[in-house]
């Protein structure tokens, strides 16, 4: 039976980069995207370019019932040896300006979907000779900050959840890993943020193709994840914590209040 890698949030940004990188390695893919994102175009591109088997599902993963029915279908029809929990969203604004729907969506996608997808797919993953789960957290996981709504806290969840799973599954055939990249120019909001940060933004920005390739190299060697942000990590490590939170919050506040 053919084995597949699942990539959530596959249509663009880092998810697209992971999907293409997997195809280039001859790995069959199950691409998951929100409806209306033309995921069939990427799916066809992968099949034509790499000759692998690729299928796609259009699912809103912020809905619990969708996650349950999607994973039921997957478990009935596919053998999965790699799950990349990539889909994730955030926002930058005053907490009281965010709709309750946005706050809930971030939690559902970044927290509920990551943990429920993993729980549902674990029996499938565990039945393979070797399998992997790669969760996409963020540098934000280590840095609480204002005006980012629940995003940093949700990424701290992803980081903590994966490390706990990694310990629990240490002596099994399921290998867990988490990456914590800094800013990548994947969407207009991040491109704008990188520009506003000037030279620091430019020298610390990461590229999705690079992140995908290096992450998979480390994952398949079952090694510790690549450290993507040595400069940012050093700067943040040097800042005393009583300054760090107001300093970062001030930067984020400027990002959305500047014309
Ligand atoms: N960009 C950065 O600077 C950065 C930095 C650190 C970590 N990250 C993390 O990296 C991951 C990918 O980010 P990105 O910047 O490449 O993505 P993005 O361009 O911001 O797009 C959001 C991603 O989430 C998916 N998505 C959004 N709502 C969804 C829903 N309801 N159901 C299913 N999927 C949904 C989208 O998938 P489809 O369009 O395919 O539906 C897309 O892949 C995220 O977890 C993000 O938090 C990003």
Image (cartoon, rainbow, N blue to C red):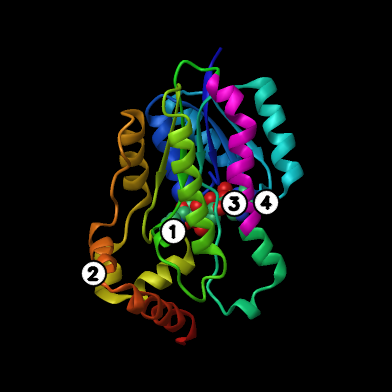
Find the distance from the CA under tag 3 to the CA under tag 1. 13 Å
Looking at this view, is 88 or 223 the one in front? 223
Nearest to N terminus: mark 3 or mark 1: 3
Boundaries of the magenta span: 107-126
The number of numbered badges drawn on the structure is 4
**Dot 4: element:** loop
Direction from residue 35 to residue 129 in the image, left or right: left
Q: Quadrant of residue 8?
A: top right
Nearest to N terminus: mark 4 or mark 3: 4
**Dot 2: element:** helix
Looking at this view, is 24 or 165 the one in front? 165
Nearest to N terminus: mark 2 or mark 3: 3
Looking at this view, is 55 or 232 the one in front? 232
Label 4 environment density (alpha carbons within 10 Å; few <14, some 14–19, many ≥20): many
From the image, give the main secondary structure of the stretch colored magenta: helix
| Above-or-below relation of 69 to 16 | above
Please indicate, yes or no, whether residue 133 appears anywhere in the rendered image: no
Residue that badge 1 annotates: 141
Q: Residue visible at 33% across and 79% down?
A: 243
Please indicate, yes or no, whether residue 20 appears anywhere in the rendered image: yes
| Above-or-below relation of 121 to 117 | above
Q: Residue visible at 61% across and 30% down?
A: 121
Residue 62, label in figure:
4
Label 3 environment density (alpha carbons within 10 Å; few <14, some 14–19, many ≥20): many
| Above-or-below relation of 71 to 13 | above
* Badge nearest the viewer, 2 or 3: 2
Magenta stretch: includes residue 56: no
Residue 196 spot, x, y in % from top left: 36, 77
Find the distance from the CA under tag 4 to the CA under tag 1. 20 Å
Residue that badge 3 annotates: 111
């Amino acid at each position: 039976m053919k084995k597949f890698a699942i990539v959530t949030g596959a249509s663009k940004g880092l998810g697209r980069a992971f999907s293409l990188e997997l195809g280039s390695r001859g790995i069959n893919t199950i691409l998951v995207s929100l409806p209306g994102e033309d995921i069939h175009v990427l799916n066809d591109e992968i099949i034509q370019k790499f000759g692998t088997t690729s299928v796609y599902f259009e699912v809103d993963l912020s809905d619990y019932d969708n996650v349950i029915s999607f994973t039921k279908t997957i478990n009935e029809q596919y053998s999965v040896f790699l799950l990349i929990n990539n889909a994730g969203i955030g926002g930058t604004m005053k907490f009281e300006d965010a709709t309750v729907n946005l706050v809930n969506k971030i939690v559902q996608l970044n927290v509920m979907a990551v943990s429920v997808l993993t729980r549902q797919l674990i029996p499938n993953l565990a039945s393979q000779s070797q399998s992997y789960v790669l969760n996409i957290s963020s540098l934000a996981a280590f840095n609480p900050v204002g005006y980012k709504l629940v995003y940093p806290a949700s990424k701290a969840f992803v980081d903590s959840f994966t490390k706990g799973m990694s310990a629990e599954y240490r002596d099994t055939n399921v290998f867990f890993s988490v990456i914590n990249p800094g800013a990548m120019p994947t969407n207009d909001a991040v491109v704008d943020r990188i520009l506003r940060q000037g030279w620091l933004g430019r020298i610390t920005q990461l590229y999705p193709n690079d992140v995908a390739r290096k992450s998979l190299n480390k994952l398949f060697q079952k090694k510790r994840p690549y450290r993507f942000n040595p400069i940012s990590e050093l700067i943040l490590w040097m800042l005393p914590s009583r300054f760090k939170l107001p300093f970062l919050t001030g930067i984020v506040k400027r990002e959305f209040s500047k014309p």
